Amino acid sequence: MAAKTASPDFEKSLAELETLVERMEQGDQSLEQSLKDFERGVALTRQCQQALKTAEQKVEQLLQQNGQEELVPFDPDDQ
């Protein structure tokens, strides 16, 4: 059940990160505000990376439970 709550948090963090990047790219902020946004962006990036790592571990566990212990790289062209 934890996976269901992790996904919205990931999506929310990613959306906030995109907003911060757009705001910083405009260049209209003060140095102080840019630094605050950068600091928040670093924290959000870490949260997103952790959520992705957790999801990857869950996939690995599910594959092992199904007897598929060999992981193959994801290829988006296979879809």
Image (cartoon, rainbow, N blue to C red):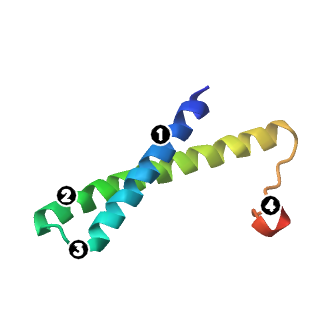
- SS class, disc 4: loop
**Residue type for callout 2:** Lys
**Residue type for callout 3:** Gly
Q: Tag on residue 27?
A: 3
| Residue under label 2 | 36
Q: Tag on residue 9?
A: 1
Number of the front mark, 1 or 4:
1
Estimate the spatial distance between the alpha carbons at disc 4 and disc 2, rounded to whole Å: 40 Å
Q: Position of residue 25 (x, y in %)?
A: 31, 72
Estimate the spatial distance between the alpha carbons at disc 3 and disc 2, rounded to whole Å: 14 Å
Identity of the residue drawn at 83% across and 61% down: 79
Estimate the spatial distance between the alpha carbons at disc 4 and disc 3, rounded to whole Å: 42 Å
**Residue type for callout 1:** Asp
Number of the front mark, 4 or 2:
2
| Residue under label 4 | 72
- SS class, disc 2: helix
Crowding near the residue tagged with mark 4, few <14, some 14–19, many ≥20 C-alpha atoms within 10 Å: few
Q: Is the C-beta separation of discs 4 and 3 under 8 Å?
A: no
Estimate the spatial distance between the alpha carbons at disc 1 and disc 2, rounded to whole Å: 21 Å
Q: Is the C-beta separation of discs 1 and 4 under 8 Å?
A: no
Crowding near the residue tagged with mark 3, few <14, some 14–19, many ≥20 C-alpha atoms within 10 Å: few
**Residue type for callout 4:** Val
| Residue 25 placement, left or right of 64 | left
**Residue 64, located in which quarter of the rendered image?**
top right
The disc, 1 or 4, on the residue closer to the chain's N-terminal end is 1
The disc, 4 or 3, on the residue closer to the chain's N-terminal end is 3
Identity of the residue drawn at 81% across and 36% down: 65
